[in-house]
Image (spheres, rainbow, N blue to C red):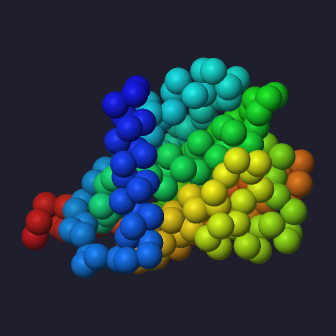
Amino acid sequence: MASSETQRLTNLVAQLRQLYRPQTNPIKRPHELLDIIEEVHSLVLHHLNNSNVVWQQSAELKRCFISCVRDQIIEVFLNISMNAIEAMQPRGGTISFDLLQPIDKDQVGVIISDNGPGFDKDALQHIFEPFTTTKENGLGLGLSICYGIIQRHGGQILADSQPGQGTTFTIWLPQVTQSQEMGE
């Protein structure tokens, strides 16, 4: 756990550097989306158990591949999950993962929702701006980094929230077809 958290923090520092001084495009490869979600689950499992938060994954999650830099997508899902866990304290709650299959099949949507305290409209309008936070000890960089990562992947990240009713993030990412997956 300590090793994975150290690696996560190392990645966060690297992403902060990239946020302000982006390098050339890293190589995107096909990765199985459910494997990424499962890895995030294993990384937050300890936090879930200690925070009275339940992880729910739709039983209907279908196998699909996305074109991505794996560590960056893990960082996005991990950041949103950890924010949700922290927001639902001290009472606990539920984090849910689900997928949306669009009509054109060029992208897949990942829905991450929680039943935490949510945000008001003013906070929601600025949620992806750097140095914007509702946390007492937050820096306000996590979601702006997530936004930049998703944009660089050719995707889109949207947030919806209402006070007292939780928050939902919908993340659209390029889906890889079977022929692309096989390297054709």
Determine the image quadrant of residue 181.
Answer: bottom left
How many marks on residues? 0
Residue at 74% x, 50% y: name it: 135
Q: Is residue 74 left or right of residue 26?
A: right
Q: Is residue 136 left or right of residue 175?
A: right
Q: Is residue 157 left or right of residue 168?
A: left
Residue 116 is situated, as x and y percent measured from the top left of the image, at 78, 43
Which quadrant of the rendered structure holds the C terminus? bottom left
Residue at 11% x, 66% y: name it: 183
- Residue 99 seen anywhere in this rendered image of the structure: no
Residue at 50% x, 46% y: name it: 78
Residue 10 is situated, as x and y percent measured from the top left of the image, at 36, 48
Q: Indicate whether 174 appears above or below 53.
A: below
- Near-viewer residue (132 or 91): 132
Which quadrant of the rendered structure holds the N terminus? top left
Determine the image quadrant of residue 132.
Answer: bottom right
Residue 82 is situated, as x and y percent measured from the top left of the image, at 59, 42
- Residue 101 seen anywhere in this rendered image of the structure: yes
Q: Is residue 78 left or right of residue 38?
A: right
Residue at 35% x, 77% y: name it: 22
